[in-house]
Amino acid sequence: MFNDVGPLELVTLVVLAVLVFGPDKLPKLIQDVSRTIRKIREFSDSAKADIRDELGPEFKDFEFEDLNPKTFIRKQLDNDELGLKEIRNGFDLKKEMADVTDAVHGRESGSSAAGGSSEGTAGGTVDMAKKPEQPAADEHPPYDADAT
């Protein structure tokens, strides 16, 4: 619960509590706080049990921590009924981004230079390595009435 509280910070909190509440009232205050925390935990546990009872026997192993999106995704990736690991391993985002960057800068990418499939105009695709033609300085681009 207090994973990021260091020993010096804990000592500072104790000294501050003694100074603010005094040594006479501090034990009573600690008892009241611990009793309140215990009641909150009991209330939370009973609410979870009520929800599990209402959901029925098919949700007996339901954990409320699974409602956290990160936990849910990790659990589904570990289950891997859909073959998500295969898809994730087959997709190399860094390589794809490098290919796009090379195409924008007019360089040949590593996959097309190594004899892989390069995008050409023969298959009906646009050659990304080819620079678009720029109009002359005194020419204006064509006006498209439908675009405005």
Image (cartoon, rainbow, N blue to C red):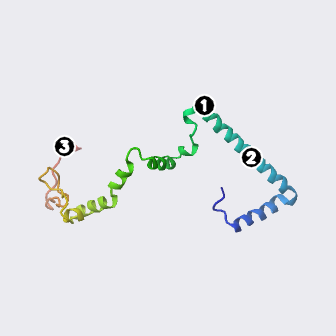
Residue furthest left in the image: 122
Q: Which residue is mark 1?
A: 54
Q: CA distance from mark 2 to mark 3?
A: 72 Å
x then y, percent, for residue 3? 64, 60
Q: Which residue is mark 2?
A: 38
The amino acid sitting under disc 1 is: Glu
Q: Which residue is located at x 83 percent, y 57 percent?
A: 26
Compared to residue 71, the image places residue 107 above or below, namely below
Q: Which residue is mark 3?
A: 145
Question: Would you say 28 lies left or right of 104 here?
Answer: right
Q: Camera-side residue: 85 or 21?
A: 85
Question: Which sits earlier in the primary sequence, circle 1 or circle 2?
Answer: 2
Residue furthest bottom in the image: 8
Q: Secondary structure at mark 2?
A: helix
Question: Would you say 10 lies left or right of 102 here?
Answer: right
The amino acid sitting under disc 2 is: Arg
Label 3 crowd bin: few (<14), some (14–19), many (20+), radius 10 Å: few
The amino acid sitting under disc 3 is: Ala
Q: Quadrant of the C terminus?
A: top left
Q: Nearer the viewer, mark 3 or mark 1?
A: 1
Task: Give yes or no for contact between labels 1 and 2 (Cβ–Cβ under 8 Å).
Answer: no
Q: Camera-side residue: 79 or 33?
A: 79
Q: Nearer the viewer, mark 2 or mark 3?
A: 2
